[in-house]
């Protein structure tokens, strides 16, 4: 996802030479979105290190500005749970030629899953709920017919299904007028996106091991859970059946990014030239730890017919990259009064160094005790330790160029046109080593010394391979946006935009065997004898899989702008596309409750 955002961001930055949009996702105004990215509003300008001087006075943005996912319906109390405050203008009064913008944004969203629990074990769920649910079920039985309870069954179970996504963004943007038509801007932006999930990222299935007792099978996406079941003999005050299972699952994804960009502009009459140099540090890290344990006993007091197993799977993957970007823009202000212009821009971004780590650990330990025909306990122990550890390098390269025009066609009509080309290249090379130790131990419990019936089977597998992934995406975009001003006071603006896009994408995955897998199997019997076999992977070869995709799409956007006073601006986006809007009559209250709007406060 981040790679796609980088590509889209470069296209956007070519339009505005706001290269700092690469890496850090910068909020965009409703006007900019409704006109397909062809016509900017004050928000887009004040967050650009070179364009902030174009906005006079002060601007204040708050949580009423709807700048997280742009889908908040405030009159419906449909919120993205954000805190946002942004302020721009001459915030440091002793320095009159310094323009500053500050943005602080925090956002958190919790999604609860719908789950059910079968408490009585009949195969049907007895209770349902969102997120964390728990139940305690008890059943009493009179099995002897003496009007006295003989057996108590009890199950305590819970499920927890929750996904949390949170993000913070901090932006400090400054631009200083150097005189002589030159300005210098510097912007620092830091952002971190974190996702936390307590559903299983792995499957847990021990069916093929030969276990003789019941246990649950966990599949990908199952929620964290507990299941504790007992059957108690009341007269004897003993637990005759016990089952205890726990699934603890956790996945955390974090994407911290820091971008620093400096820009210079030079005005010469109605011509304007600008350039930006930027540095971006980004990381994408995934950490998973899934634990599953299951125990079942027919008679725990004597430890006969008992099963206990636990398995832990851990994964850590991280990509870190440092990228340098350079962009330039030339603009001709042909219609300065209407803020109309024609411009051309180009940009390039390439990785200065990137690294990747990839590590998977899988540890399994199961013990099973079964009463055999001789009255002894057959004990089987499964013990598996798997490690796949890798590291490598990442290289990236992105470039693009394009042009844009903002043209006043007539007094109420303003047209935005653009044409942009962009290309993104990504390559990752990882070398991975595999080390797997899989063992099974059997003891028939007869305490016979040097018993050849007892044995331990241990298989050790080692190997090394290389994985190379290459991705290339090329896009052509031709956005067009239109504004029409209407109303008695000319304080309303209708906006509409379209973005035809042509895309070409190729993915190449190459796998190379560096060291073939070698498996050494050693069976050691109770009498001390051993059998050893060594198996070398005979058929191994490099594989290369290529995929190519070509597609086109066109997105349509629309919105409204309202300027009731010089100090207040209200913008609407997709006002016919809310949860109920226009499904009912336009005069129905649901239409107004589902409006998505953004409020900007202005001071001059």
Image: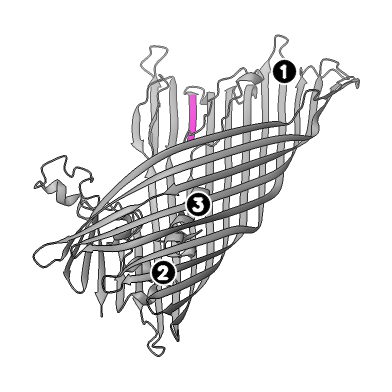
Q: Which comes sooner in the sequence, label 2 or label 1?
A: 2
198 in relation to 148, above or below: below
Q: Nearer the viewer, mark 2 or mark 1?
A: 2
| Contact between labelled residues 1 and 2, with CB atoms less than 8 Å apart | no
Q: Nearer the viewer, mark 1 or mark 3?
A: 3
The image shows residue 546 at horizontal and vertical percentages of 61, 33
The residue pinned by badge 3 equals: 422
The residue pinned by badge 1 equals: 378
Q: Nearer the viewer, mark 2 or mark 3?
A: 2
How many C-alpha atoms fall within 10 Å of the one at disc 2: few (<14), some, or many (≥20)? Answer: some
The residue pinned by badge 2 equals: 331
409 in relation to 155, above or below: below
What distance separates the C-alpha of mark 2 from that of mark 1? 84 Å
Q: Which comes sooner in the sequence, label 1 or label 3?
A: 1
Q: Secondary structure at mark 3?
A: strand
What distance separates the C-alpha of mark 1 from that of mark 3? 67 Å
Residue 507 in sight in this render: yes
The stretch in magenta equals 224-231
How many C-alpha atoms fall within 10 Å of the one at disc 3: few (<14), some, or many (≥20)? Answer: many
Question: Residue 409 colored magenta?
Answer: no
Considering depth in this image, is 262 or 391 the residue closer to the camera?
262
């Amino acid at each position: 996802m981040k790679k796609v955002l980088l590509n889209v961001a470069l296209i956007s930055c070519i339009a505005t030479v706001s290269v700092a949009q690469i890496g850090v996702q910068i909020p965009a105004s409703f006007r900019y979105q409704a006109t397909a990215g062809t016509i900017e509003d004050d928000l887009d300008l004040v967050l650009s290190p070179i364009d902030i001087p174009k906005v006079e006075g002060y601007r204040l943005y708050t949580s009423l500005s709807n700048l997280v996912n742009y889908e908040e319906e405030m009159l419906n109390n449909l919120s993205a749970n954000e805190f946002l405050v942004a302020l721009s203008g001459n915030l440091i009064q002793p320095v009159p030629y310094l323009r500053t913008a500050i943005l602080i944004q925090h956002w958190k969203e919790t999604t609860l899953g719908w789950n059910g629990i079968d408490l009585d074990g009949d195969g049907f769920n007895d209770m349902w709920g969102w997120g964390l649910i728990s139940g305690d079920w008890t059943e009493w039985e009179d099995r002897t017919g003496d009007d006295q309870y003989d057996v108590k069954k009890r199950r305590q179970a819970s499920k927890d299904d929750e996904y949390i996504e949170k993000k913070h963004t901090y932006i400090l943007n400054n631009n200083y007028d150097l005189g002589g038509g030159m300005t210098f801007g510097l912007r620092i932006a830091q952002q971190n996106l974190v996702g936390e999930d307590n559903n299983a990222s792995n499957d847990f299935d021990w069916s093929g091991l030969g276990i003789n007792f019941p246990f649950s099978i966990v599949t990908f996406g199952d929620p964290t859970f507990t299941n504790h079941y007992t059957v108690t003999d009341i007269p004897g005050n003993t637990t005759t059946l016990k089952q205890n299972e726990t699934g603890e699952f956790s996945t955390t994804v974090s994407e911290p990014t820091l971008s620093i960009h400096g820009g210079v502009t030079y005005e010469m009459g109605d011509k304007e030239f600008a350039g930006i140099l930027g540095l971006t540090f980004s990381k994408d890290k995934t950490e998973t730890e899934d634990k599953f344990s299951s125990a079942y006993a027919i008679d725990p007091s004597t430890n006969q017919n008992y099963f206990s197993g636990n398995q832990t799977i851990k994964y850590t993957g991280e990509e870190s990259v440092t990228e340098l970007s350079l962009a330039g823009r030339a603009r001709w202000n042909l219609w300065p009064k209407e803020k109309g212009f024609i411009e051309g821009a180009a940009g390039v971004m390439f990785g200065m160094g990137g690294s990747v780590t990839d590590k998977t650990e899988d540890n399994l330990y199961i013990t099973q005790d079964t009463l055999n025909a001789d009255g002894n306990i057959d004990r089987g122990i499964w013990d598996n330790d798997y490690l796949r550890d890798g590291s490598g390098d990442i290289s990236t390269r992105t470039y693009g160029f394009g042009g844009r025009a903002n043209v006043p066609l007539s007094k109420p009509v303003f047209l935005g046109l653009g044409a942009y080309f962009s290309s993104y290249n990504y390559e990752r090379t990882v070398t991975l080593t595999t080390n797997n130790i899989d063992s099974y131990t059997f003891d028939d419990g007869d305490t016979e010394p040097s018993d050849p019936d007892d044995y331990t089977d241990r298989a050790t597998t080692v190997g090394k391979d290389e994985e190379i992934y290459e991705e290339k995406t090329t896009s052509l975009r031709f956005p067009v946006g239109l504004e029409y001003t209407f109303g008695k006071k000319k304080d309303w603006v209708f906006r509409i935009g379209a973005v035809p896009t042509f895309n070409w994408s190729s993915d190449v995955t190459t796998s190379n065997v560096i060291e073939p897998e070698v498996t050494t199997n050693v069976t050691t019997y109770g009498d001390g004898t051993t059998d050893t076999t060594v198996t070398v992977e005979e058929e191994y070869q490099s594989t290369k899989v290529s995929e190519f995709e070509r597609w086109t799409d066109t997105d349509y956007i629309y919105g409204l702008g309202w300027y009731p006073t010089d100090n207040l601006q209200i913008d609407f986006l997709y006002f016919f596309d809310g949860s109920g809007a226009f499904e009912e009559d336009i005069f129905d209250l649901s239409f107004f409750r589902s409006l998505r709007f953004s409020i900007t406060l202005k001071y001059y």
